[in-house]
Image: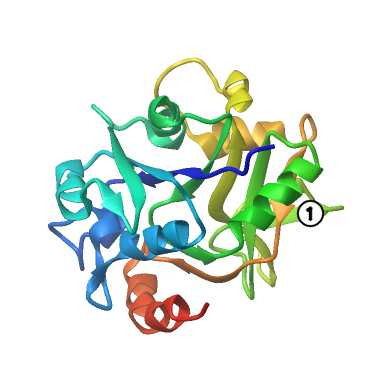
Amino acid sequence: MRPVDEAIVLAGGLGTRLRSVVADLPKPLAPVCGRPFVAYLLDLLAGQGMRRAVLATGYLGEQVEAVLGASWQGMELVYSREPEPLGTGGAIVLALRHIHGAACFVLNGDTYLRLDYAAFDTQTCRHGAALGIALAETADVSRYGAVETRNGCVHAFAEKGHHGPGYINAGVYLMQRELLDAFPLGSHFSFETDVMQPMVGRQIIAAFTNTRGFIDIGVPEDYARAQHMLRELASIP
């Protein structure tokens, strides 16, 4: 089977919670150590041999395209612009028009995660899963909600509010195009709530836990933390 070499980067969020510190830029262009945050995500993808990345843009999407251009370290960049907010699910459906293969990775444009994408691909295929999710281990799952695993697969999603260590959804997925059959009708929906969570117990969702360096810049406190962490993380092979 041909390795997956295309990715969708969800870069269309309004970034409302971050506006107090980044007022005039779309969230993926928020500067971190002198570079747009999304540049670090594209570095990871290009460095692991991705052939094409689709930037699913929305709010101030023209700025994203102007800054990033048509290629990144030899990787083709194309753009899927939302005419109106579509939610994560609607944005994925729209961006899939630019994906040529039978599967692709999907990344949240406001989170950073170190992982071996080829290994993620291999593990998901081994389980025969139409969907794989990369998880991050954290000391406190309360902000995100825990993901419970069993035998390398997702067993349950716990709601936010539970405290203590565990695994969380790190916002990186491997998705087979056939998964579109599980998407709800309509253009605006949440992939996480309307597709992924109802799949648990009905379909296999592979869980990939060999990850590190998770950063979410969605709130000002974590955006400030990223300024100190990302330069070091990005320099690690």
- Quick check: 174 left or right of 91? right
Identify the residue at horizontal 47%, vertical 44% (top origin).
7
| Residue type beneath disc 1 | Thr
Is 41 placed above or below 94 here?
A: below
Identify the residue at horizontal 31%, vertical 55% (top origin).
72
Quarter holding the N terminus is top right
Residue farthest along the top direction in this orientation? 185
Residue 37 at x, y percent in the picture:
31, 64
Residue 202 at x, y percent in the picture:
78, 29
The front one of 178 and 108 is 178
- Residue 78: which quarter of the image? top left
Is 27 placed above or below 11 here?
A: below
- Quick check: 159 left or right of 99? right
- Residue 60: which quarter of the image? top left
Q: Is residue 157 visible?
A: no
Q: How is the image coloured?
A: rainbow
The front one of 66 and 46 is 46
- Quick check: 64 left or right of 73? left
- Quick check: 218 left or right of 131? left
Residue ID for mark 1: 149
The front one of 165 and 234 is 234
Q: Is residue 194 visible?
A: yes
Number of other residues with Cα within 10 Å of mark 1, as a class: few under 14, some 14 to 19, many 20 or more: some
Identify the residue at horizontal 76%, vertical 31% (top origin).
203
Q: Secondary structure at mark 1?
A: strand
Residue 118 at x, y percent in the picture:
63, 54
Residue 148 at x, y percent in the picture:
76, 54
Identify the residue at horizontal 58%, vertical 43% (top origin).
4
Is 92 placed above or below 160 here?
A: above
Is 193 placed above or below 173 here?
A: above
